[in-house]
Image (cartoon, rainbow, N blue to C red):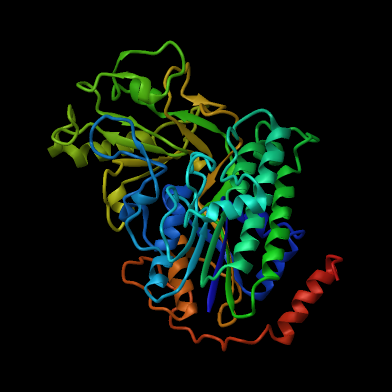
Amino acid sequence: MKICVLGLDGAAPEIIFGDERLINLRRLMDLGVYGRLKGVIPPDAVPGWMCMTTGQDPGSLGVYGSHNRPDHSYDEPAFVNSASIKALAIWDQLAQEGKKSIIVGVPPNYPPRPVNGISIGCSLTPDTIKNDFTYPSDLQAKITELVGEYAVDVKNFRTEKKDWLKQEIFNLSRKQWQVVRWLLTGQEWDYFHFVDIGLDRTQHAFWNYFDPRHVQFEHGNPHQDAIPEYYRRLDEEIGSVIELLDDDTILLIVSDHGAQRRDGGFAINEWLIREGLLVLNEYPKASTPFEKLDVNWGKTKAWSESGDCAIVFFNLQGREPRGVVPASAYELFQDEMKSRLEAIPDENGHPMKPLVFKPRQIYRNVRNVAPDLIVHFSELSRTSIESVGHSKLHLHGDDTGPDGYIHASHGIFILTAPNCPLTGEYQGASLLDIAPTLLDLAGYEIPQTMQGRSLVAGMEKKRSGGGPDDETEKIVHDRLAGLGYV
């Protein structure tokens, strides 16, 4: 049985399940099982997609974001790449069975990882003209012949040039889905996995134009429909893919995390300086990225190298070169820091309710150089800002450019399979449950390394090969008729 996974980076449950105009997704929901999908901590594409395909949490993968400390020195963190993931993914498991896979844009996939099949790079690819972005490499010429210059991302998507940006994102999407259809119909595969990055970029660029609850929202603005328009475009593309799949294919629509408005940011390193935990030899005169600060490591106890959430490290004796915090006091200091972070108020003096996590309490294993604490501010509605040189701790903007949205902890899944015994809305699914479920439905053994559970474990599978029954067909027909499509 074939498996086709269409990943929608950052797809929001509220939109996917709430917009009746997404008729192809409505059809799949009626035919299969769907629900909110609990993501990992941190809720980012890296490591999220690989957590999904390996069934392992970020600590077990040893990857805690798109940048990771390669060692305990004070050097700048290194970019994660395809070689950073050592665990076997679902396509590796299937290769052991002699099955072929096609993976397109599943991060981190630069350099494009060798697979038993075809591998196309993700948004981490520096340049699709100068760098190899496919495996095997000779596939690049065929893709260029098909769509011209292939794009893995939109450069400079944090910009005020919204008309230009929207056109670039939609062009990116059009080319990528054209390549997807070409691969589905013209190449051999047993497992297919594509991730649409355009949705995430659209939401970063236009959420403040779309969400009436956003502080920057203005009614009647010219970009109010940009996000719903992109979702409708995705629905059409998904519909075109459905027509290409046979009845004996497992189809999964899934996102690595959700989406919500960005209420602002919290300058975590600024706070650490004010608390006497991060000490500088010289305070900057303007906003300055952390890696360019003149840090006095002999007096510093903690610092943060952050993404959307704060990744906090301690300057530990015997671990860091100029460690200050005694190793014997590590747990006591960790508890103290957790309490101090949880007590941070918002700009009005009200509780900000940060969620502060200890890696060893949330991950089954902790590998490589892990953070000492991970912090979600205001339940993820405020981003963590690592730069220093601000006049206040709470900021309305972002130090990386215009950005209206932030990742939410729950994404979505919609699963249809000819033998799936589940239908309707499902509650309690996790990102780590996806790979075991797909393997179970397709008739493969689930490796012990996978930490999730099959959603259909122990359930009797339906007989595959037939189409939907008459009752299901009637439900779908009636719903589409009510929307005016039949």
Q: Is residue 293 above or below residue 462?
A: above
In the image, farthest residue toward the bottom: 463
Q: Is residue 6 above or below residue 246?
A: above
Q: Quadrant of residue 302?
A: top left
Q: Residue at x 65, y 32 (%)?
A: 215
Is residue 393 visible in the rendered structure shown here?
yes
Q: Locate residue 65, reporting x and y percent.
A: 40, 44
In the rendered structure, the answer to whether residue 215 lies left or right of residue 272 reads: right
Front position in the image: 432 or 219: 432
Q: Residue at x 43, y 71 (%)?
A: 436
Q: Is residue 418 above or below residue 340?
A: below
Q: Is residue 247 above or below residue 231?
A: below
Q: Locate residue 384, reporting x and y percent.
A: 45, 33
Q: Locate residue 435, reporting x and y percent.
A: 45, 67
Q: Quadrant of residue 218?
A: top right
Quadrant (top left, top right, bottom left, bottom right) of the C terminus: bottom right
Front position in the image: 481 or 326: 481
Q: Locate residue 390, reporting x and y percent.
A: 47, 18
In the rendered structure, the answer to whether residue 345 lies left or right of residue 335 reads: right
Is residue 43 visible in the rendered structure shown here?
no
Count of residue discs? 0
Q: Quadrant of residue 370?
A: top left
Q: Residue at x 66, y 36 (%)?
A: 208
Q: Residue at x 66, y 28 (%)?
A: 160
